[in-house]
Image: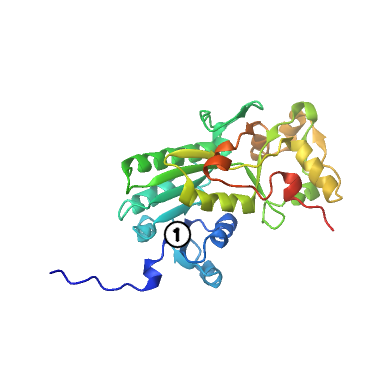
Amino acid sequence: MRAPAPCRPAVFRRTRVLIVGCGDVGLRAAASLAPGLRVVALTSQAARAPELRALGLRPLVANLDEAAAVRRVAGLAARVLHLAPPPGQGATDPRTLALLRALALGRAPRTLVYGSTTGVYGNADGAEFDETRAVAPATDRARRRVHAEAALRAFGRRHAGPAGTRVTLLRIPGIYALDRVGGDPRERVRRGSPVLRPEDDVWTNHIHADDLARACVAALWRARPGRVIHVCDDTRLRMGDYFDFVADRFGLPRPPRLSRAEAASALSPMQLSFMGESRQLRNARMKNELRLRLRHPDVMAGLPAPC
C-alpha cells in the first residue's frame, strides 16, 4: 500500500497567481484578487522587492531578457497575468518567447492572460468594429505585440485540452487615471501639447486603470480559450475633444489645435503615430463574457470634477 501523501501547508494549497510585469496595472490587479490567493509578482528590479512584500505579494526577481533566470517561473502558478512590455525596438518580442519557453518546462498554467494593445489594428479611419477585425500593425511597436500574440496563441494550441491552458489576449487602448504615473491626462494638458484641428482629428478609446485591473482578474477565471477581448469603456470622443474636456473639467487652458501638416513638423514621430490611427472599439465581449460592469463607463465618470 502506498504511503499517504504528506499534508502540505495551507500556503502551498492555495491557488497561486503569477503577475509578470507588476507595474501600476499589475499592482491594481493584485489588489483586486481574492484575499485567499497567493500572488507572486515577477519584477526585474530587486529594489522593488520590499515594496511588493509590504503589499502582501511574493516578489520573484527575474529579468525576461535572461533565459536562465526566467526558468524559475516553470510550474509556479496556475494562473498567469502577463503585462510585461516588449523591448523598445525590433519587430519581435523575445521576452514573451522566453516566458513561454519557461512556462512550458513545468506544468502548464490553467489560464494565461496577456495585456496587448489596440495599436495592432493600425489606422481604421474611424471605423467601429469588434474583435473579429484583422490586425494591420503600422509600427514596430505594434508589430512586437502582434508577434507576442501569435506566440501566445501557438502556446495555447500546444497546451489545449481540459487540463491545458486557456490563453486570452486583452487588447487595451489608452489607460488613464488621475493617480497613474504617465496616465494622468491633466499632465499633457498642462504641458500645452497640441492636438489636431477638428477636420483632421482621430477617434480614440480609453479605459480607467482600475477597470482594466478588474478586467485582467476577471479574464483569469472567466475568459474563453483563445479569445481576443477589447478592454475599453463606452467613451465616444475624438482626441482633441477628449483633451478639451480634461482642460474644461480641471480649469486648464485648452490645448492648441494644429493641422495635420503643422503637426508633422512640430511633433515627434511617436506622438504623430498616435494621431495617425483612428478607430472606435466595441466592448460587448468584455461585458458579456467577462461579466464586467465598468465602474467608470466613460471618461466623464472616470475623471471626477474637483471639489
Residue at left 21%, top 71%?
Answer: 4
Q: Amino acid at mark 1?
A: Val
Determine crowd level at label 1: few under 14, some 14-19, many 20+ residues with C-alpha closer than 10 A. Answer: many
Per the image, label 1 sits on a secondary structure element best described as strand
Q: Closest to the observer: 65 or 10?
A: 10
Q: Is residue 293 above or below residue 238?
A: below
Give coordinates of residue 149: x percent, y percent. Answer: 45, 40
95 sits to left or right of 122:
left
In this view of the protein, can residue 65 be seen by the observer?
A: no
What residue did someone put label 1 on? 17
Quadrant in the rendering for residue 3: bottom left
Quadrant in the rendering for residue 230: top right
Which residue sits furthest front? 1
Residue at left 34%, top 58%?
Answer: 75
Give coordinates of residue 297: x percent, y percent. Answer: 69, 45
Residue at left 51%, top 30%?
Answer: 132
Dividing the image into 4 quarters, which one contains the C terminus? bottom right
Residue at left 51%, top 56%?
Answer: 21
Give coordinates of residue 205: x percent, y percent. Answer: 66, 38
Quadrant in the rendering for residue 120: top right
Q: Is residue 24 above or below residue 123?
A: below
19 sits to left or right of 107:
right
In this view of the protein, can residue 96 be seen by the observer?
A: yes
Q: Is residue 216 above or below residue 14?
A: above
Which residue sits furthest left? 1
Q: Closest to the observer: 279 or 131?
A: 131
Q: Is residue 138 above or below residue 106?
A: above
